[in-house]
Amino acid sequence: MLKIANIIPKLIMAKDFSTREDNYSKWYNDIVQRAGLAENSAVRGCMVIKPYGYAIWEKMQAALDKMFKDTGHSNAYFPIFIPKSFFSKEAAHVEGFAKECAVVTHYRLKNAPDGKGVVVDETAKLEEELIIRPTSETIIWDTYRNWIQSYRDLPVLVNQWANVVRWEMRTRMFLRTAEFLWQEGHTAHATKQEALDETYQMLDVYADFAENFMAIPVLKGLKSENERFAGAEETFCIEALMQDGKALQAGTSHFLGQNFAKAFDVKFASKEGKLDYVWATSWGVSTRLVGALIMAHSDDHGLVLPPKLAPIQIAIVPIYKNNEQYETVCAKAREIKVNLEKKAFSVKLDDRDTYKPGWKFSEYEFKGVPVRIAIGPRDVENGTLEVARRDTLQKEIYSMEGVEDKIETLLNDIQQNLYQKALSFREKNTFPVNTWEEFKEVLDEKGGFISAHWDGTAETEQKIKEETKATIRCILLNAEKETGTCVYSGKPSKQRVIFARAY
RNA sequence: CGGGGUGUAGCGUAGCCCGGUUAGCGCGCCUGCUUUGGGAGCAGGAGGUCGCAAGUUCGAAUCUUGCCACCCCGACCA
């Protein structure tokens, strides 16, 4: 490092770009659009995930898929359509999803009588309507019945990467769309303890992924009854805090008990020769994580991506005045690219002559590329490079010699720095409160996570939600037990729980 | 499904009240020249069913009615 350059002046921050303070949701939408992550589609509530946005999802998939495989799971695929009757087999489950199901009733179109377009052919009505899966527990447990007879068939450890549809009233890019992509793990076990262990294990996998890949610290906890998955005995979650002080549920892991086994009659013969119902879990994360990634790290210059999930980790921008310089500079740039690729980094050399360097700088900045290298004739002459990091916007001049190692260190540093920043943000925005007045005041003036005593009843949680829009995000798994009095009802409480307004 | 709002070129918009030139502007796009170390400049150019349908009128982006779509605020949710 020969010299430390200045932080980019505020003057040249992104044009026509909303700021977080000015209008948080517009800022979010601007990033999604301008970074080329996604756009609205012709279908209400559904989005088109564009190549750059999808590439982030693919990076997430790759990392998670490996973690699932490493914990013994296999991928499979179940149908997108679920017979309507399957849904009514588990009472709580129907109750929870009935209001947001898309239903297929016919299987054929015909030419309209007036010759304009096509209409549904009423003679092609399905005998039993098909539900487009909002989640796959029912079809999967109906299938598992045939897979499981003996304890020797257990455990079944299956994951599926799929799309699901939940007919939402109000949608937001990535955070809530009518159709979304996700993975859903569905496991079957011989004992309650084994199923519980699996539930915790996958929660840990999610937390590990969030913290080490997404660079987002998460709280691990148990959901209250109100927030529990429809059909689960217990729902566990990871909760993250976004920059506007709202919480985001980033993943869930459910202990389903024997509910689905009973509903779908999935029994197994134990070693002792006794018939018993199978114990189940399910767990999932979705493209919502892309939304989490945006809201956790990005700034008023655009997207900021952690190196481990960035589709492009390093962008190289050549600088030149004429053809001759272009050739020299690009030759050197290609050399650097090859060397960096030897370290398995994803590098983009942007040698397009149709855009100017300044334009490219801005482009990679709002696309969140962690590291940008600029190389010009002066650098070729001096054996140097200008290296800019996206998280701090700092620029430094590096010597070309051994640059691969320095970039590697830099990328690790950026990954760590993003995590630390997010962690200290969460710490600064987590508030223990003891009175109802304080609760409302903190919520309205600061937002963030509120740690407060709760009497454990659904009624109190409901009242709090009605009065403040805040819900219990989770009951921390690793929290110290501490007796106190409920912040709302004044009744006795065994431990503090985490409240927040949430996405 | 309630309450509010908006539909004009790829995007953002002016014009609408009070009907009357060839529907204007910015960004983007195309061509050429000069440029290229932080979103280039100049010159020229292309691009419009004014959301859809009907009505009023000599004449409708503009007025009326109906429909559709989208956005924001509520209830519901990963």
Image (tube, coloured by chain):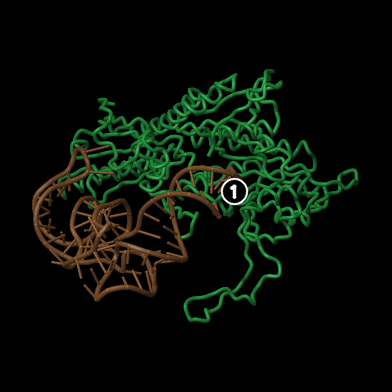
Chain colours: A green, B brown
Q: At x 50% / y 34%, what residue is drawn?
A: A246
Total marks drawn?
1
Q: Nearer the viewer, residue A398 or A185?
A: A185
Q: Nearer the viewer, residue B53 or A269?
A: B53
User: Where's residue A234, x and y in %?
Assistant: 71, 38
Q: At x 44% / y 27%, what residue is drawn?
A: A421
Q: Chain of mark 1?
A: A
Which of the image's four quarters has the N terminus of chain A? top left
From this viewpoint, which residue is outermost toward the right?
A: A273
Q: At x 69% / y 34%, what residue is drawn?
A: A458
Residue tagged 1: A183
User: Where's residue A469, x and y in %?
Assistant: 56, 35
Q: Is residue A162 visible?
A: no
How packed mark 1 is, by other alpha carbons closer than 10 Å (few <14, some 14-19, many 20 or more), is many
From the viewer's perspective, tell me whether residue A310 is left or right of residue A436. left
From the viewer's perspective, tell me whether residue A78 is left or right of residue A280. left
Q: For the residue labelled by badge 1, is the local secondary structure a helix, a strand or a loop?
A: strand
User: Where's residue A133, x and y in %?
Assistant: 63, 56
User: Where's residue A448, x and y in %?
Assistant: 51, 28
The three-letter code of the residue at mark 1 reads Gln
Q: Is residue A317 visible?
A: yes
